């Protein structure tokens, strides 16, 4: 559930507490809820869902910023992954646009069997807290795609998957070159060359996904 702080904003003209309205300070927008508290997390505002940072309280993004014709599945997916992707940028140095683009591609907007059965949004192999699920998968061996069976990490929820994705990249030394890089094109190329995926078109797919939905708006967050 969205959290609110007890901080209030008084209108300079009326001296009344601002409620259900935005106010701007130094070019940053904040929102004050019906009881006058400053908003954090997701808020439903004027038929749109808007996300406010839990630490700085400023407006981060509205779902409408990502497209005017999003399906209900896409809206739900963005709502479920954006907060974790932002947290991963702060904690692990992995830019949100690539985290989200990977999650979309790897999980098919959260609809793949792996994501519905094991909450594994990124196709990360191995085990998580001793839990895994074994499934067939296509791998490119340098000449052609072949089917193999592999163990994939299993999570209790999508939030665990988002968190583990950032940790996976940070604590595997081969991905050190992309940590803190805020250029999504650069990160997309690095992550494939570092061996995350065998598909030679993986970088192109990530870049296309970021550009289609304007996900790089999230990469400006510090």
Image: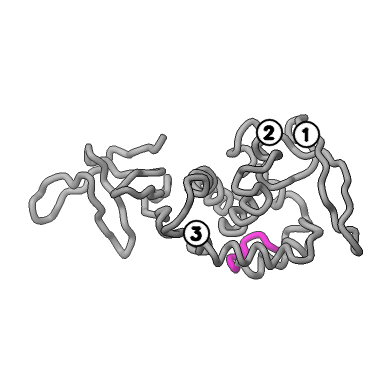
Crowding around mark 1 (Cα neighbors within 10 Å: few <14, some 14 to 19, many 20+) is some
Foreground: 95 or 151? 151
Which of the numbered marks, if any, corresponds to residue 133? 1
Return the residue at label 2: 117
Tell me where residue 17 sits by quadrant.
top left
Crowding around mark 3 (Cα neighbors within 10 Å: few <14, some 14 to 19, many 20+) is some
Q: What is the x, y in percent for residue 109?
A: 59, 48
Return the residue at label 3: 218
Q: Regarding mark 1 in the picture, which secondary structure is present there?
A: strand
Which of the numbered marks, if any, corresponds to residue 89? none
> Is residue 43 on the magenta stretch?
no
- Taken as a whole, is the magenta stretch helix, strand or loop? loop
Foreground: 111 or 159? 111
How many discs appear? 3
Q: Are marks 3 and 2 in contact (CB under 8 Å)?
A: no
Tell me where residue 20 sits by quadrant.
top left
Crowding around mark 2 (Cα neighbors within 10 Å: few <14, some 14 to 19, many 20+) is few
Describe residue 167's horizontal placement relative to residue 147 as left or right. Answer: left
Q: What is the x, y in percent for residue 131?
A: 75, 30
Describe residue 94's horizontal placement relative to residue 27 as left or right. Answer: right
Q: If you read the primary sequence from the N terminus, does the residue marked by circle 1 or circle 2 appear first?
A: 2
Q: Are marks 1 and 2 in contact (CB under 8 Å)?
A: yes
Foreground: 50 or 167? 50
Describe residue 113's horizontal placement relative to residue 140 as left or right. Answer: left
> Is residue 180 on the magenta stretch?
yes
Q: What is the x, y in percent for residue 69?
A: 44, 57
Q: Is residue 187 above or below residue 53?
A: below
Range of the magenta residues? 177-183
Tell me where residue 33 sits by quadrant.
top left
Q: Is residue 143 above or below residue 151?
A: below
Residue 163 appears in the figure: no
């Amino acid at each position: 559930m969205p959290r609110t702080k007890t901080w209030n904003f008084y209108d300079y003209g009326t001296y009344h507490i601002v409620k259900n309205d935005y106010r701007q300070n130094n070019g940053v927008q904040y929102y004050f809820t019906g009881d006058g508290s400053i908003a954090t997390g997701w808020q439903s505002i004027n038929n749109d869902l808007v996300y406010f940072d839990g630490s700085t309280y400023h407006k981060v993004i509205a779902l409408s910023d990502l497209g005017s014709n999003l399906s209900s599945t896409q809206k739900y997916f963005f709502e479920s992954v954006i907060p974790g992707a932002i947290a991963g940028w702060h904690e692990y140095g992995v830019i949100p646009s690539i985290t989200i683009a990977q999650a979309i591609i790897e999980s098919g907007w959260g609809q793949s069997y792996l994501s519905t059965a094991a909450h594994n949004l990124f196709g990360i192999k191995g085990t998580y807290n001793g839990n895994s699920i074994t499934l067939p998968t296509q791998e490119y061996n340098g000449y052609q795609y072949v089917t193999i069976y592999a163990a994939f990490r299993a999570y209790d929820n999508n939030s665990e998957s988002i968190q583990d994705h950032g940790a996976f990249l940070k604590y595997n030394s081969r991905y050190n070159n992309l940590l803190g890089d805020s250029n999504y094109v650069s990160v997309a190329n690095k992550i494939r060359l570092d061996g995350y995926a065998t598909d030679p078109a993986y970088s192109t797919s990530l870049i296309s996904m970021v550009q289609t939905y304007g996900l790089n708006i999230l990469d400006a967050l510090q």
